[in-house]
Image (cartoon, helix red, strand yellow):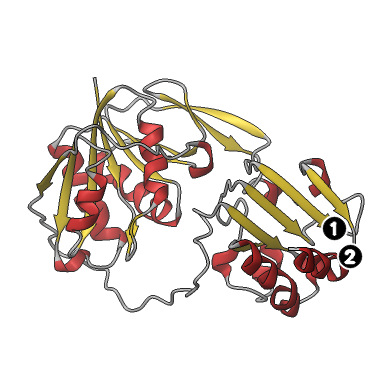
Amino acid sequence: MATHLIFAEHDESGLKKSTLSALAAAKKIDGDIHGIVLGKGVNKVAEQFAAFCTKVHLCEHDDLTHRLAQPYAKVIADVAKKISATHVWAAATVAGKDLFPRVAIRLNAGMASDIQAVQSESVFLRPIWAGDLSGEIEILTPTKVITARVSEFPAPEAALASKGEVIPFDVSLGEIKMRFKSFDAVKSTRPDLSDAKVIIAGGRGLKGPEGFKELIEPLADKLGAAIGASRAVCDAGWVPNDWQVGQTGKVVAPKLYIAIGISGAIQHVAGMKSSKVIVAINKDPEAPIFQIADYGLVADAAKAVPELIALL
């Protein structure tokens, strides 16, 4: 039977929902579910995660206060070795993509990244060619390292009948060459893009950063939505890079995705096509976004969005 180890992402608000998507992927394979929580003063996160795992390994150390790839990867690998984990999991987020190639190297393990389906305990599907095709990945090493696409594995709502055990782990880091300098966070009162139920996304059709301020932000405020953007507008500096949705940005699957002034390039579509309902507003009737939209409005966003805001 498999032994799973799932890396817990967390912030000041507690356990991130993306972690539970990795847990959902792991549960496709029968086995014991172990969690791992790293940081400093993160007992509450460990207790929260214990509601979903049989055991949670609590790894606290001053040098784990900030998420640095070198020490985090070492500790994750150390815990995986201690429990003889057959599968080591994380969500395919910025953190998972940063840490888990290092974890795989430390475990001398094969890795499947950004998977969208579990075929068996050693075979996984992942999107290729910007999501147009699926590749079948077979991992033959005894330990398998996997990151799961959040949009494809809904987080479980119900916890276990009884809370799992939280087990402190004796952290040994050795020499650390990485040092934390600073973190420039994008502060917002809006929902996190990866966890949002509603996302309003803007593209080049908004014609400038003022389009986001005058159209996207008021609409997002009305709907309690997160704000996303295409790569083109992020590269142009109109909005923060943290807002980017797409193959090289964040992959999302909200209940409602409203794309405004976004043409629908394949790289963007790869990051949002799993949304439950897609609404597109674009003045070009030939825009590719209309091919995947559930509802489409051919109109100038500068006229249509204020009318929508007024109606709301």
- Residue shown at the point (63%, 73%) measured from the top left: 239
Report the side of 252 relative to 138 (left or right): right
In this rendering, the answer to whether 171 lies above or below 158 is below
Q: Secondary structure at mark 1?
A: strand
- Residue shown at the point (39%, 27%) measured from the top left: 139
* Quadrant hosting residue 55: top left
Q: Amino acid at mark 2?
A: Asp
In this rendering, the answer to whether 105 lies above or below 246 is above
For disc 1, the neighbor class at 10 Å (few under 14, some 14 to 19, many from 20) is many
For disc 2, the neighbor class at 10 Å (few under 14, some 14 to 19, many from 20) is some
- Residue with the mark numbered 1: 282
Q: Residue furthest left?
A: 170
60 or 213: which is nearer to us? 213
Q: Are marks 1 and 2 in contact (CB under 8 Å)?
A: no
- Residue shown at the point (77%, 41%) measured from the top left: 294
The C terminus, quarter of image: bottom right
Counting from the top left corner in percent of width and height, residue 291 is at 81, 41
- Residue shown at the point (28%, 67%) measured from the top left: 66
Counting from the top left corner in percent of width and height, residue 22 is at 39, 40
Q: Amino acid at mark 1?
A: Asn
- Residue with the mark numbered 2: 300
Circle nearer the N terminus (1, 2)? 1
Report the side of 82 relative to 100 (left or right): left
31 or 51: which is nearer to us? 51
Name the mark on residue 73: none
Q: CA distance from mark 1 to mark 2?
A: 6 Å
The N terminus, quarter of image: top left
Counting from the top left corner in percent of width and height, residue 83 is at 15, 35
- The answer to whether one can see residue 155 in this image is yes
Report the side of 104 relative to 173 (left or right): right
- The answer to whether one can see residue 264 in this image is no
Report the side of 41 relative to 265 (left or right): left
